[in-house]
Image (cartoon, rainbow, N blue to C red):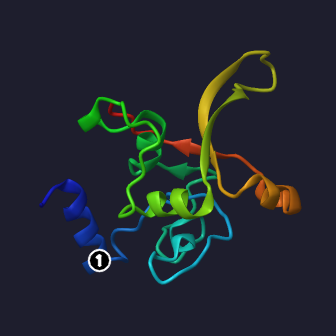
Amino acid sequence: AINEMSMLAYYHHIKPDKFQLFPVVPSHNYVLNRHICNVSEFGPGGRDVGPSTGNGVWDPNSWGQLIGGTSKRGGRDKGFTDSTHIAGQAIRTNQCTTKLLCRHMDSSSDGCYTAPHIRCGDQEELSLHPEQSVWTPLWNLHVHS
C-alpha cells in the first residue's frame, strides 16, 4: 500500500543526500545477523542518519506501539513490535526497553517532568558494560491507542 511513510522512504532511497533520517535507535552494540538490517546504521552517527539532533532518538512509531499498543487493537496489544520496522528489530533482538523517567526542568527548580527513555541490552550485559546502561531520551513519542 502507498502511504506517506512509504513515499518518504522511497524519496530517501532515491535522494539520500536530500532527505536524511533522524536516529531511531540508541547507541548500542547491536546483534548482527543475516535476517535483519544493521540497526546501528540508524542510531546516532549511523551511516543512514543525518546530522546530530542532540542526545535523543526519534520515534518512527515502534516505540509508541511497544508502550501503548496499536490503534487497530485499541491498545490491548501493549508490547507490540513489528519485525519490519528498524526499531522493532532492535527491540526484538537486543532486549530494548522503555521507561518513563523524571528529569529536572532546570538547575534552579526542584520539580521535574516525566519523559520516555529507552535502553538496549540485558541486565547482565549492562552490568559488564556500564557505559551502555545510559537511558536515551525518546522524542516525538507516537501513541495511537
Q: What is the quadrant of residue 5 in the picture?
A: bottom left
Quadrant, the C terminus: top left
Query: In the figure, 137 relative to 132: above or below?
Result: above
Q: What percent of the width, then of the height, locates residue 28?
A: 67, 65
Q: What is the quadrant of residue 122 in the picture?
A: bottom right
Q: In this view, does 25 lie to the left or right of 134?
A: left
Which residue is situated farthest in the top direction here?
110
Q: What element carries label 1?
A: helix
Q: What percent of the width, then of the height, locates residue 55?
A: 65, 52
Q: Residue under label 1, please give it.
A: 13
Q: What percent of the width, then of the height, locates residue 21?
A: 42, 64
Q: Is residue 88 left or right of residue 44?
A: left
Query: In the figure, 23 relative to 114: above or below?
Result: below
Report the residue at 45% width, 75% height from top: 36
Q: Nearer the viewer, residue 124 or 134?
A: 124
Q: In this view, does 104 lie to the left or right of 116?
A: right
- Give the amino acid at mark 1: His
Label count reads 1
Q: Which of 105 and 40 is in front in this view?
A: 40
Quadrant, the N terminus: bottom left
Report the residue at 57% width, 78% height from top: 32
Report the residue at 50% width, 68% height from top: 42
Which residue is situated farthest in the left direction here?
1
